Amino acid sequence: MEKPHIAVLPSPGFTHLVPILEFSKRLLHLLPHFHITCFIPSVGSPPSSSKAYLQTLPPTITSIFLPPITLEQNTDPSILALQIELSVNLSLPYIRQELESLCSRAKVAALVVDVFAHGALDFAKEFNLLSYIYLPQSAMLLSLYFYSSKLDEILSSESRDPKEPIKIPGCVPILSTDLPLPFQNLSSIGYKGFLERSKSFHVPDGVFMNTFLELESEAIRALHEHVKGKPGIYPVGPIIQMGSIDHENGMECLRWLDEQEPKSVLYVSFGSGGTLSQDQLNELAFGLELSGQKFLWVVRAPSGAVNSAYFGAETKDPLQFLPQGFLERTKQQGLVVPSWAPQIQVLGHSATGGFLSHCGWNSVLESVVQGVPVIAWPLFAEQSLNAAILTDDLKVALRPKVDHSGLTEREEISKTVRGLMEEKEGKEIRKRMELLKIAAANAIKEDGSSAKTLSELVASFKGF
């Protein structure tokens, strides 16, 4: 028989693959006699970023790409969560086959699935395995899932004032406009999908979430009180990808940062899937120029859909969409790179003093771990929730205002950038972020809150 195993199932997309495998590394650190096998569903051919990342993994993690599926029968491509979920559901026969094969040749202790791969939890029952959901996001998002029926009641109430903030136990009150997009239309297929998904959180033995006690202490306490032990709630973060992936843009960015003053550069990036409209791209360009601050900007080709880069590779040259003369005028002030930059190394560089971010949870944690204050610019998924946590709860971010047409104008961008980079408010934010950086480092030390949580849990695997 082979070594004892844990089977891991991400959902498609680089931003879901990396967190669950970084978590897998953490498991193996505590269970060195174990092996992890990862079954990877994919839409079309796997992205090159995923393949490059998989090559960096230790030999104790095996990856198996499942046969790619097509999403032709998908209902609405703008609802990303449903696209991701559907792609996993279409892969379920392959997942079961691979899991059965693994169980026939090795002792498998547990199945850990990504939040959008919950359809596979039934297989854990079938093969008598412990089961866990890995939520690569915040305790606040997990609270939305666990309080979904109460939340549905509040949102459906005819007498509710839409301007009244929504209170979820342990969480900062939020405006309904900061709830994920499907919540803006309660009869939408996206919202029904959320309610359906929330039922799956009562199925597994536990839920891991990529956060830590000191970051979301009240939300985590409220969750423990609410679920009362089943499933177990395990904050195990911050888990971020620390390794680097070589890329020619990477060296250029880091060389340019080496020439800048400490904490003088604003890093601008909307993650691996975020895109802006052409109008908003123009306003951002003029706003950065107007601010007079140094910037390093990762530019993507514009699109009408905010998440258009999530599954697809980019084919157009993004730099051709910038305002005429912008690159020439700002060549002393900033560096613009197409599509990609080595984010961890950029955020960790001494010259980086701020991060204009879409507030995807991976980026939130990376900015916390590196102690870099944020300008919150959410685009899709639960990014507005994360922006609310950073601005209203932790007070480590500024959030520019949006005008009546949904655009953030250049003057507002310029004002917010200067506010973060050189004004008193920005200095206060920086101090608070420095304290969070220390708390994040402590959480994963041997006696830290997240390390202890995980150690106590894996003690139950030691008999394998």
Image (cartoon, rainbow, N blue to C red):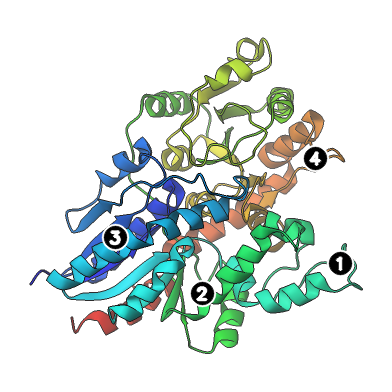
Gap in angstroms between the C-alphas marked 4 and 2: 34 Å
10 Å neighbourhood of mark 2: few (<14), some, or many (≥20)? some
Disc 3 is placed on an element classified as helix
Q: Quadrant of the C terminus?
A: bottom left
> Which is nearer the eye, 177 or 419?
177
10 Å neighbourhood of mark 4: few (<14), some, or many (≥20)? few
Residue drawn at (25%, 71%) of the image:
30
Disc 1 is placed on an element classified as loop
Sequence order check: which comes first, mark 4 or mark 1?
A: 1
**Which residue was labeled with disc 3?**
25
Q: The disc labelled 4 sits on which kind of residue?
A: Gly
Gap in angstroms between the C-alphas marked 3 and 4: 41 Å
Q: Residue 69 carries which label?
A: none
10 Å neighbourhood of mark 3: few (<14), some, or many (≥20)? some
Q: The disc labelled 3 sits on which kind of residue?
A: Lys
> Which is nearer the eye, 168 or 256?
168
> Which is nearer the eye, 304 or 375?
304
Frontmost of labels 2 and 1 is 2
Q: Position of residue 6 (x, y in %)?
A: 26, 69
Tell whether label 2 touches label 3 (CB within 8 Å). Answer: no
Q: How many marks?
A: 4
Q: Residue 406 carries which label?
A: 4
Disc 2 is placed on an element classified as helix
42 versus 28 height, above or below: above
Q: The disc labelled 2 sits on which kind of residue?
A: Ser
**Which residue was labeled with disc 2?**
200
Q: In this view, does 343 lie to the left or right of 22?
A: right
**Which residue was labeled with disc 1?**
164
Q: Is residue 426 left or right of residue 372?
A: right
- Is any atom of residue 361 visible in this view? yes
Q: Position of residue 412 (x, y in %)?
A: 80, 35
Tell whether label 4 touches label 3 (CB within 8 Å). Answer: no
